[in-house]
């Protein structure tokens, strides 16, 4: 069983910063892409940033220059550094990972997993 656990959300004033963390655990063989998505009330979930196992990144246009994604492969972790936060960044942020799991020496297919979400609220 694979679990993704996020941390670091909270309330911040406009212009402030936060760092979100996500750690994967369980019977992991390898982790491919990891990423962050967000969902604001009444809106669809959208990609914020994604990082490959080799470190290549994709950043959404509306957060480019303000958000950065990184990962620590040794810790099976991914991070989202957010600066110059705006009220429109308010959303539940979800960690996502594509994982090849292993059990009893057998590899499963790459499977997508989600964290439980962490609330980020940008407000004065």
Image (cartoon, rainbow, N blue to C red):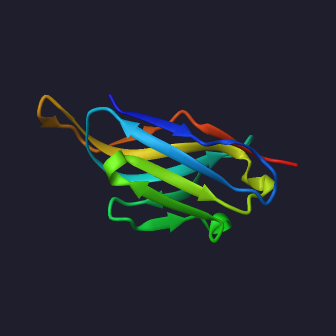
Residue 10 vs residue 105: left or right? right
* Residue 57 seen by the camera: yes
Q: Position of residue 79 (x, y in %)?
A: 51, 52
Q: Residue at x 56, y 39 (%)?
A: 7
How many numbered discs sit on the rendered protein? 0
The quarter holding residue 42 reads top right
Residue 3's image quarter? top left
Residue placed most toward the observer, 108 or 26:
26
Residue lying farthest to the left in this orientation: 105
Please indicate, yes or no, whether residue 45 appears anywhere in the rendered image.
no
* Nearest the eye: 46 or 36: 36
Left or right of 57 in this view: 65: right
Q: Is residue 103 left or right of residue 65?
A: left
Residue in the picture at 31% in, 32% down: 26
Residue 77 in the image: state x and y as whole percent. 42, 47
Q: Residue furthest bottom?
A: 65
| Picture layout, residue 111 above or below residue 64 | above
Vertical placement of 50 versus 21: above or below?
A: below
Which quadrant is home to the N terminus? Answer: top left
From this view, report whether residue 59 is shown above or below residue 107. below
* Residue at 56% across, 43% down: 94
Extreme residue in the right direction: 124
Along the horizontal axis of the image, is 79 left or right of 17?
left
Task: Give the x, y percent position of residue 15.
Answer: 79, 60
Which residue occupies 11% across, 34% down? 105
Depth order, front residue of 113/120: 120
């Amino acid at each position: 069983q694979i679990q993704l656990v996020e941390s670091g959300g909270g309330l911040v004033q406009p212009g402030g910063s936060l760092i979100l963390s996500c750690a994967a655990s369980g019977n992991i063989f390898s982790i491919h892409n990891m990423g962050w998505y967000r969902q604001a009330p009444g809106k669809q979930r959208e990609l914020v940033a994604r990082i490959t196992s080799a470190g290549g990144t994709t950043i959404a246009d509306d957060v480019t220059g303000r958000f950065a994604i990184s990962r620590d492969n040794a810790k099976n972790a991914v991070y989202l550094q957010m600066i110059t936060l705006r009220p429109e960044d308010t959303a539940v942020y979800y960690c996502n990972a594509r994982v090849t799991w292993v059990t009893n020496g057998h590899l499963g297919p790459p499977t997508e997993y989600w964290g439980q979400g962490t609330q980020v609220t940008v407000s004065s």
